[in-house]
Amino acid sequence: MPFNSFDDYPMSWRPTLRRAGGPLYLELAELLEQDIRGGRLLPGTRLPPQRELADFLDLNLSTVSRAFKLCAQRGLIAGTVGSGTHVSYDALASLSPLPRADKPALLELGALLPDNRSFVEVTEVLREIAAEPDCGRLFGYDYEAPSLWQREAAARLLERAGCPSSADRLMVSGGAQNALAAILAGLFSPGDRLGVDPLTYPGLKSVARMLGIQLVAVRQERGVMSAAGIAAACRHDRIKGLYLMPTSQDPTTRTMSVQERQELAEAARRHDLLLIEDGIHSLLTPSPLPAIASFAAERTLYLLSLSNTVSPGLRVSYLVVPERYRPPLEDALSNINLTISPLLLEMASRLLASDRALQLLEAHRREAERRNALADHLLAGLTLRGDAQSFYRWLELPKGWTAERFEKSAELAGVAVHGAQRFAVGSAPPPAAARLAVCSPPDLKTLEQALTLLRQVVENG
Amino acid sequence: MPFNSFDDYPMSWRPTLRRAGGPLYLELAELLEQDIRGGRLLPGTRLPPQRELADFLDLNLSTVSRAFKLCAQRGLIAGTVGSGTHVSYDALASLSPLPRADKPALLELGALLPDNRSFVEVTEVLREIAAEPDCGRLFGYDYEAPSLWQREAAARLLERAGCPSSADRLMVSGGAQNALAAILAGLFSPGDRLGVDPLTYPGLKSVARMLGIQLVAVRQERGVMSAAGIAAACRHDRIKGLYLMPTSQDPTTRTMSVQERQELAEAARRHDLLLIEDGIHSLLTPSPLPAIASFAAERTLYLLSLSNTVSPGLRVSYLVVPERYRPPLEDALSNINLTISPLLLEMASRLLASDRALQLLEAHRREAERRNALADHLLAGLTLRGDAQSFYRWLELPKGWTAERFEKSAELAGVAVHGAQRFAVGSAPPPAAARLAVCSPPDLKTLEQALTLLRQVVENG
DNA sequence: AAATTTGTCTATTTACATTTC
DNA sequence: GGAAATGTAAATAGACAAATT
């Protein structure tokens, strides 16, 4: 029986078990969750070692372990051998990848809202299809879709994006998020681990959490996952794969060089890792670099969505899938979608087969360049990462700032931005930086207003 | 150390552990999976009691238990206290809800393929929209969808289907399968259990298996889940909810009476169960019965898809969601879809707001009536369940048949049907019956041919 | 109707590997 | 560089409750 001897040592968390009958590990896990959600345990706080807690509560070590494991799976805490268990920085983050409409009207530099231009090219295709006498066929079932010409049209676009592919390795999903959900649900099991950049795409964080797949931050060198980091994540966390965005990584905007891509492919092969390569921005750069998939085709799922760069409303994206992953991924996609809309697939395919998709792309690119030029001008002197065609930039803040505090100050000034903590994985403190979605404001005028306000926020500390 | 003493007793399974280093429970689970998939353990086989296996293999009881649990989560086996562990009847079933195109061309009475008629009404709406100058707005993001009028149009249809609802409780998904995936992923956790009819919709079986959610067959009385069966499933299996198709249940075609619906709602309330009510066929009957959701609105997710009864290609379905499940289900839907296509939603909404959806519905209904009349005529004398508007019928076979054997014999005769085993949950042997999708053949002529062949198959034993 | 069979669950013991100091 | 700290995982023990006989 433990005595008050513990009162002498400071313990960051001293829960009281009611021991009211139910399983002890569950009660402990619930207490921990409540204390984190209630703000009594702040992000980054180090919890007492499991053995110490076990002593304090008069429990077995494994009972504490089990409770911690439950909370880790819910994304609340993350443990590291040697350095203990910490409350995750994103423990309180929303589970949804969508922006919540609970804030007062702000100048939006937070959520990514690709410019709502007129989409003439898409409209054109719609009218073409509607005019055809047999368009009713697009409203029945079509289990065989996509057809050969549709596959070939997609393969050409993929080639342009740096991922040479063949028609038979191609699959279709209802957008990038839909594809990620299918990949995680179909190729991973709850409890499996996936390596990611220390700052990663929040949409991935939320599906992974929903499906009980743990994300592991892989150590970087010079802004990209290092071979040593990957080796460590394999040994220590037994990760099954890596999620990568080698071109204009969200949110850091880092683009990997060809050599870095080759090295990464090599490392993946060495450790027999599955790669998920998100090529979402690969079409934006004037001459895209070769995809990692082109160096490790046997293990890379390459994902190309039309949402950002062509039209968000089309809900079509393409997947290049290695042979061995095809059957399970087909099952997963049909479990999630049954089929995708033949009409939308037809529209997307025609956009690709003609050069209209590229026209749209080009228009988005030019708009992005205008906006980025303005941003470079208005924020001159600050560290603003990202190249001229990017839809967002990465603002590294001067000493003294934290990402959370900056996000809040910006909001008070009337501008929504996404601080680094929203992208953080695990329990390492996020850097002082924020993502600015320069393409989200409706026009240049509004962007100018937002950036000017932001500059004042940075300078007035 | 175990001796040969076991050789005297017959054990249905005698695996040999290689003990080559890895975890024992994993090795055992893999052996079991291999032996089931390899056909060395047939569906229905009773495995040795866990204690006996543990003795035989010189393992701890819990180690065997853990291995069995893994296989149970993969849907390979199902255990019942008292009566032991059995190999599931659907252990070898495909994980995909789609028909596989690996069979020679057969007369299709297996898969449900709603008749590919011309869909004039849908085409009409498409042309209407395409003609409008501002239709480009349907290709941007629309996080606020569905809009008020769209919700109201859907609410009217739901009312007609027997589920009075309000615009604010409404959510939208990309078809019924998509909705089921979101519900299971968002409101259930791996290992949770869901009660279902002993024969249930295969699309549910496959998502549930993918997500690690265990289906539990609830005991029936007079063809519907009984209060006692529900109570037993709660006590023994601690199910979290029930999946129901009260109108023209797939595959048995059983429709619950109003009283049965009320009693079921009452039972759900008593045991605090979540209900998933699939109203997929509720619009087909001339005057639909009140939905179970109308008796237990606080706990019922009501699902209405347009795929079967209006147009399969639209990929839109509606969900009526009780207050407390809205936030997690919204998160789940956005994790899986991000958003659904504004164009498809607009088309569906216009179909509903005008009376064109009802016209389509009516056309499908009349076609079904013609086909069912033919079926009743050609299979007169056999037990053929299902009413005049159903898309499929349930053929109960004479003594001597098993469902598997009938399915195979029919296939040899050139007709695809789905035997009861495809719908079976758990380890109880499925009844001798098969589902005939009378609406799948392209025309009445083909249907006649198929049914005539089937009759011969039945009669020639 | 009582004893036994049987699966399930929680808690415990033991071992291990990595990181920190 | 080695000892201590620390989290993770597997195997084991014990208790429980439902179903069978």
Image (cartoon, coloured by chain):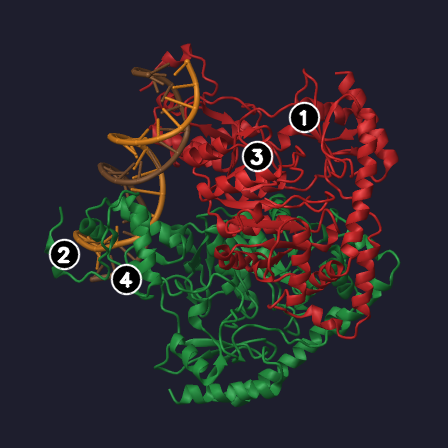
Chain colours: A green, B red, C brown, D orange
Amino acid at pointer 4: Arg
Residue at 70% in and 39% down: B100
- Residue position for label 4: A46
Image mark 4: chain = A
Nearer-the-camera pick, A342 or A385: A342
Residue B185 coordinates in the image, percent (x, y): 52, 50
Confirm whether circles 3 and 1 share one chain: yes
Q: Position of residue B43 (x, y in %)?
A: 56, 25
Circle 2 residues within 10 Å: few <14, some 14–19, many ≥20? few
**Residue B248 can be seen in this image:** yes
Q: Nearer the viewer, mark 3 or mark 2?
A: 3
Q: Which residue is mark 2?
A: A6
Mark closest to the chain's N terminus, 2 or 4:
2
Q: What label sits on residue A1 in the rendered view?
A: none
In what element is the residue under mark 3?
A: loop
The reply to whether the C-beta atoms of the residues labelled 3 and 4 are less than 8 Å apart is no
Tag 3–tag 1 contact (CB < 8 Å): no
**Which numbered marker is on residue B433?**
1
Q: Secondary structure at mark 2?
A: helix
- Give the labeled residue for mark 3: B197
Q: Find the distance from the CA under tag 2 to the CA under tag 4.
A: 17 Å
Q: Amino acid at mark 1?
A: Ala
Real-space Cα distance between discs 3 and 1?
15 Å
Name the residue at 66% across, 77% down: A365
Q: Position of residue A168 (x, y in %)?
A: 71, 50
Disc 3 marks which amino acid? Answer: Asp
